[in-house]
Image (cartoon, grey):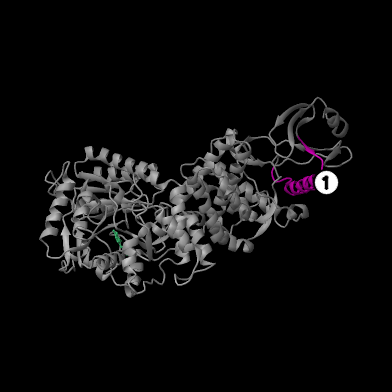
Amino acid sequence: MEKILDQYYGLSGCQFKKLVGYISTNYRIKCDQGTYLLKVYKDSPEDQEQILAEIEMIQRLDHLDAQSVSTAIPNHTGDKITVLDGHIYRLMSFVEGQFLKEVAPTPAMYTSLGQFMGKIDVKLKGFRNTPIEARKLDWDLQYFQRVPPLTRYVEKPEDRRLVEHFILQWDQHVYPRLEQLRRAIIHNDGNDWNVLIRDGEVKGIIDFGDAVHSPLIHELGITMAYALFDKEDPMKWATYIIRGYHKEYPLLQDELDLLYYIIAGRLVTSICFSSYDKTLQPDNDYITVSQQQVLALLRQWIAIGPVKAKNTFYKAAGFAIDTPLSEEEVLKKRHQVISPILSVSYQRPIHMHSAAFQYMYDAHGRTFLDAYNNIPHAGHQHPRVVAAGQKQMATLNTNTRYLYDQLEAYASKLLAKFPSALSKVYFVNSGSAASDLAVRLAQNFTGHKAMMVMEHGYHGNTRMGIDISHYKYTSRGGKGASDHIIEAPIPGTYRGAFQGAGAGQQYAAQAIARLKVSDNPVAGFIAEPVIGCGGQVPLAPGYLQAIYPAIRAQGGLCISDEVQTGFGRMGSHFWGYEMQGVVPDIVVLGKPMGNGHPMGAVITTDAIAEAFDNGMEFFSSFGGNPVSCAIGSAVLDVIDEEGLQANALSVGNYFMESVRALQSEFPCIGDVRGSGLFTGIEFIKDENLTPDTALASHIKNELRNRHILVSTDGPYDSVIKSKPPLCFTKANVDQVVGEMRDILSENH
Ligand code: PMP
């Protein structure tokens, strides 16, 4: 190499230092004449063409600022590359500076980063170059479709779902608008190891090897993706970069609309390619370490959400932010067409815009941590579930009067979660339709009409549903119990007649006594394993084992309403009844079954199903349709693959432990109970357990004001209920409990 430098470039006394490089071997060389960069490539016509294209591009940027890019140093024949013995030698000026990665960031530096990239793109405006325009690089975001097949290499399911979420968002938001975006030749890799700092500002950039002709906004998105690593408040730093860029090269609103997804797109590309590389080099710890940064930013990105990001980006560029109607106005419009009998949560209602996993974003760009909604069981908009529904919806959606494979496949998959005695399933579209059908099955099988129901229980909004819902028929507007209803006292061990060991049997004995005095033999007994509307009250241990035989002794059937407690939420068990060591005759399913898609089901035995088949057809227009089956099946897959039941157990236990720790500081917390991610916190005024309804309501509303969703319930509305999506994390718990501590401290 010394010889080449001497003969072709007239350089003497050169000392070499090898630098990192991917396609080429790179050297920093210090010679008598100065410092240079030498890149050595294996020769090929394609590489020659690309290198010359890069050189042409850099020439365009020459005199951007002094020493901002590595310009080509021609050899003695005037050529910008020297091709010799199967190698290409490319001598360039050396750009001094520290990499962005190596310095402490400042607002001025980040503004200059945006400005610098903006200036480059201004210089490149109108630049045409056939080899660059013909390139199809994996790292060019316009070919993002190459990334999804690599998601299977992302090792951890919790990382994979994040990656899949942003791929889905890309498909929804970016892909349809890609062709309309302004395009240009861009550097395409303004990452923190390519950008150089001098005197606290960005003054240079290296490595034009990724240059492509692509939407202009990709330039900014890629630069930001790396610059935002390890920042507590990424939006603050994003603002500086955008301001800087916009000053040099005014951005369009259309571009800023997509920037949130484009930044995520680059992060996802990085994770997918590095996960694939990791399979080739399993011992390369560098890959793992750098992935952690990317994943951490993706997790922050989910917590920020698209609305807040867009508003921040608009503001940084000086565009007016759309102001949505106020909540009062939205509510007023709603009440013009929807009866106020449909209640709205919180003193200040929330106008939702979108959601992802355990986060919900309102129209104003506020992110709410969802510690309440159990329907999006696997997480709001879970990408696997959405994709399953979208695909099936585009293929076939029909009803059970035709044969299609999805019905049997899903039914078998679902029934595999039950003991073999429970072997038939009816699909419907809500928990209400399911409990209504469950009662019909029981009444048909037994020939009896009476139902034993749980105090404070809720099972549905149909006429039959209300009949068996003490929670409804005894509360405001209720007409009291119908003649065929026998009530079982709620077997809670915090309040009520019995507390210690044996309480379950004692409560059961009380209920059995009522059964015996009733003139009507029961068709069935329906209860939830943890009574949600009763204030998250777990049935006292041993209760079902004691009461089920008594119901069956009268010829009645035992129904477990697993609408809220099913599908792994309990943590220790997949179904709530398993906690009591019993097998019901009928199980009612709903809410989480379709992760938000309206699904319900009744599971029962062969004998009960056979008796129901009495000549009258059972038909549900939508129950068991192929789209619902595909969605339900995806939900089961996600629960298993992501270990959501185990997560419910560990995070749920952590939640309860954390709140119990609060309990010692705040005696107003009377009881902390539940199972897995299905918890209740009961508030009291004194040692007589006087319910503190006002305090529970205050905490609920204050948490809402601090962007955390929970609700209150129970006979006195004094219990805070939490039943979040099962992807909830311990960090989420810390946020909830931390805010709760603050609110309680302020209240004292
Ligand atoms: N059973 C229980 C235990 C429920 O919580 C609910 C709904 N809150 C239902 C049945 C009725 O389900 P849906 O609202 O889907 O009709």
Whole-percent x, y for residue 120 in the image: 67, 49
The residue under the point 51% across, 54% down is 313
Q: Is residue 41 magenta?
A: yes
Magenta span: predominant SS is helix
Residue drawn 26% across and 49% down?
680
Q: Percent position (x, y) of residue 59?
A: 76, 47
Give the residue at mark 1.
45
Disc 1 residue type?
A: Pro
What residue lies at 46% left-to-right and 44% top-to-bottom? 233
Whether 448 is drawn above or below 725: the answer is below
Question: Is residue 690 positioned above or below 173 on the image?
Answer: above
Residue 264 rendering spot, x and y as whole percentages: 54, 50
Q: Which residues are magenta?
A: 38-65
Name the outermost residue toward the right: 77
- Quarter residue 427 falls in: bottom left
58 or 22, nearer to the observer: 22
Relative depth, front residue between 27 and 412 = 412
Q: Residues within 10 Å of mark 1 (few under 14, many from 20)?
A: few
Q: Taking 677 as reference, is 452 left or right?
A: left
x and y percentages locating residue 36 in the rendered image: 75, 33
Distance from mark 1 CB to nearest ligand 1 atom below 8 Å:
no
Please determine whether, in this image, residue 387 is positioned above or below residue 61: below
Q: Residue furthest left?
A: 517
Position of residue 49 relative to residue 328, above or below, is above
